[in-house]
Image (tube, rainbow, N blue to C red):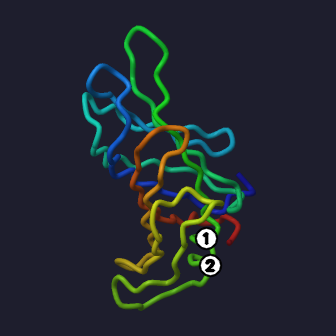
Amino acid sequence: MENLLGLLRIHVERGVNLAIRDVVSSDPYVVIKLGKQKLKTRVVKKNLNPEWNDDLTLSISDPHAPIHLHVYDKDTFSLDDKMGDADFSIGPFTEAVKMGLTGLPNNTIVTKVLPSRQNCLAEESHIVWKDGKVVQNLVLRLRNVECGEVELQLHWIDIPGSRHL
């Protein structure tokens, strides 16, 4: 607890063009892991373009640790099928939070993160000032699967008495 920097709220918005793992569809859900923390969205039945709109919150003590995202197909009688995975870093996001911005016009782009071989971004990701806070929208292309993307939005939550970024 003494090493805690703050909380990262991950809004898992939707999946796009996810892989088929059952006969004609899938029952997908997302698992997000950071160190020993593991959080999971709800299952959306029979949908390859699910709208989760779930908020998951991770406690952050190391802003450079990678966050792992896995998509699974819920099965009733067997182990859940893997539908792809992706990793992302919050380094650029925490750097933007560290700037201590205030009073900017809504939707001002603070910085951009470009897709590369080192990240799983499907497109350029903007870190923006929105409604008085720093927000990052991500579209992650899933690896180890034939197709699929997951859309996320990141928000930082300061905790009174925590270490500062």
Quarter where residue 33 is shown: top right
Instruction: Name the element at disc 1.
Output: helix
Q: List the single residue furthest toward the front.
A: 146
On screen, residue 151 above or below 35: below
Rendered location of residue 8, percent (x, y): 53, 58
Q: Quadrant of the C terminus?
A: bottom right
Circle 1 packing at 10 Å, graded few (<14), some (14-19), many (20+), is: some
Q: Is residue 46 shown left or right of residue 28?
A: left
Instruction: Name the element at disc 2.
Output: helix
Residue placed at 40% from the left, 34% from the top?
Answer: 29
Q: List the single residue furthest toward the top.
A: 77
Residue placed at 42% from the left, 56% from the top?
Answer: 152
Quarter where residue 27 is shown: top left
Q: Which mark is residue 28?
A: none
Which is more toward the observer, 39 or 114? Answer: 114
Residue placed at 36% from the left, 34% from the top?
Answer: 42
On screen, residue 97 above or below 82: below
Give the amino acid at mark 2. Answer: Lys
Circle 2 packing at 10 Å, graded few (<14), some (14-19), many (20+), is: few
Q: Looking at the image, do the residues carrying marks 1 and 2 touch, with CB atoms under 8 Å apart?
A: yes
On screen, residue 69 above or below 133: above
Give the amino acid at mark 1. Answer: Thr
In this figure, which residue is indicated by the disc labeled 2? 98
Rendered location of residue 102, percent (x, y): 47, 88
Q: List the single residue furthest toward the right.
A: 3
- Count of all numbered marks drawn on residues in the image: 2
Give the Cα separation between the discs numbered 1 and 2.
6 Å
In this figure, which residue is indicated by the disc labeled 1? 94
Which is more toward the observer, 40 or 113? Answer: 113
Q: Is residue 96 shown left or right of residue 63?
A: left
On screen, residue 92 above or below 141: below
